[in-house]
């Protein structure tokens, strides 16, 4: 069936509000969909935007799903000493998933993400400062196949300028933080170690630390960083910046959009949002995908998403389960 309509993911922010108005011009029928992850109902800016556009607003109650698949999952990851990425998880397991469940065969699923489409693949958005392809690397390919991203070729400043010019109502505050309080639950105090294995302090729980963290470590006479978190023995290891370097990492729960035909294979990988992609070699060993960085990467954190690119197209994404460090020489000084 030909796609003649759109279901627009509406959050009330400027991006989704402007995308909704673009869809009114491009499709014969348009619905707005709001995914309620809090259970607190519809924000006024969402109702205002949908009302001003004159479209039907569909509410999806996803509070239970969000709590199970994002909040509890994140807390469990933290309790294991891992650094979760709740936003990428939410896109894949809650927001896009929930809207795709109610998508009609005649509709495209439209979002305000700054990404582009290349056939069935997604590409980096034209606005390098707002590109969100990394956050969509865990979304199922069947869902992304039905998605359209009208802001992919636009700059954020132009979107905001057009929304203001057209007097489109939207929430003026940009949300940059998590939409829930992330806590690791009850944890036991443990040891803070230096890279030589010497105990140099105590901590209140591994869930309070992440790889690359500098703040909250106390005074050690020099700038120190968290270089390892081990929940099994309750230790947090700190070292200098050079000790943050990793030669590679291992990915689990891989989500492929286009799996390389042969391994080893060369690709670009991105291990954190707003980090530049770097060249790497991909190889399957012992049932896991191993990533070997061409040059050592800094602060690669188990639990984070690693997105895999060919040029500017995302071909897959997975969760970092472990890292491979450059040799620590045991010199804590």
Image: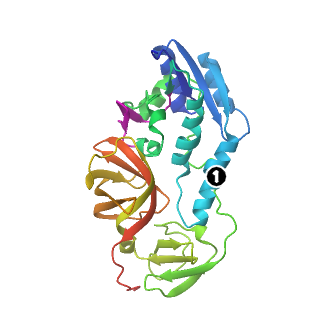
**Residue at the limit of the structure toward the bottom, as seen here:** 198
- Asked if residue 115 lies in the magenta stretch, the reply is yes
> Is 322 placed above or below 172 here?
below
Q: Which residue is mark 1?
A: 71
> Is 45 placed above or below 195 here?
above
Examine the image and state in which quarter residue 259 appears. Answer: top left
> Is 137 placed above or below 159 here?
below
| Residue 218 pos. (x, y %) | 55, 77
Few, some or many residues within 10 Å of mark 1 (<14, 14–19, 20+)? many
Left or right relative to 252: residue 314: left
| Residue 55 pos. (x, y %) | 61, 17
Residue 273 in sight from this viewpoint: no
**Residue at the limit of the structure toward the front, as seen here:** 286
Q: Which residue is nearer to you in this view: 189 or 282?
A: 282
Q: Residue at x 39, y 30 (%)?
A: 154
Which quadrant would the C terminus be assigned to in this image? bottom left
User: Is disc 1 placed on a helix, strand or loop?
Assistant: helix
| Residue 226 pos. (x, y %) | 48, 72
Residue 306 in sight from this viewpoint: yes
Q: Which residue is nearer to you in this view: 140 or 279?
A: 140
Q: Residue at x 49, y 22 (%)?
A: 165
Q: Residue at x 55, y 40 (%)?
A: 174
| Residue 43 pos. (x, y %) | 68, 33
| Residue range of the region highlighted in magenta in the rendering | 110-129
Left or right relative to 318: residue 81: right
Q: Which residue is nearer to you in this view: 83 or 287?
A: 287
């Amino acid at each position: 069936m030909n796609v003649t309509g759109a279901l627009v993911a509406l959050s009330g922010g400027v991006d989704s509000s402007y995308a909704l108005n673009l869809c009114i011009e491009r499709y014969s029928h348009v619905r707005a969909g709001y995914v309620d992850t809090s259970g607190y109902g519809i924000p006024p800016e969402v109702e205002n935007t949908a009302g001003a556009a004159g479209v039907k607003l569909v509410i999806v109650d996803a509070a239970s799903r969000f709590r199970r698949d994002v909040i509890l999952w994140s807390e469990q990851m933290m309790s294991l000493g891992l650094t979760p990425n709740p936003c990428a998880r939410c896109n894949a397991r809650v927001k896009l998933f929930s809207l795709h469940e109610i998508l009609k065969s005649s509709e495209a699923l439209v979002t305000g993400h700054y990404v582009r489409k290349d056939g069935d693949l997604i590409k980096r958005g034209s606005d390098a400062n707002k590109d969100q392809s990394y956050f969509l690397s865990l979304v199922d390919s069947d869902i992304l196949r039905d998605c359209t991203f009208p802001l992919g070729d636009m700059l954020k400043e132009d979107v905001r300028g057009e929304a203001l010019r057209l007097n489109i109502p939207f929430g003026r505050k940009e949300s940059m933080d998590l939409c829930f309080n992330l806590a690791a639950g009850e944890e036991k105090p443990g040891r803070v170690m230096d890279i030589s294995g010497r105990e140099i302090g105590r901590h209140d729980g591994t869930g309070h630390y992440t790889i690359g963290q500098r703040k909250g470590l106390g005074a050690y006479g020099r700038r120190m960083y968290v270089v390892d978190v081990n929940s099994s023995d309750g230790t947090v290891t700190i070292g200098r910046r050079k000790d943050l370097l990793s030669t590679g990492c291992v990915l689990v729960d891989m989500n492929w959009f286009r799996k390389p035909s042969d391994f080893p294979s060369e690709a670009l990988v991105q291990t954190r949002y707003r980090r530049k992609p770097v060249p790497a070699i991909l190889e399957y060993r012992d049932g896991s995908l191993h990533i070997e960085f061409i040059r050592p990467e800094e602060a690669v954190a188990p639990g984070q998403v690693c997105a895999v690119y060919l040029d500017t197209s995302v071909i897959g994404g997975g969760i970092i389960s472990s890292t491979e460090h450059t040799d620590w020489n045991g010199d804590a000084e």
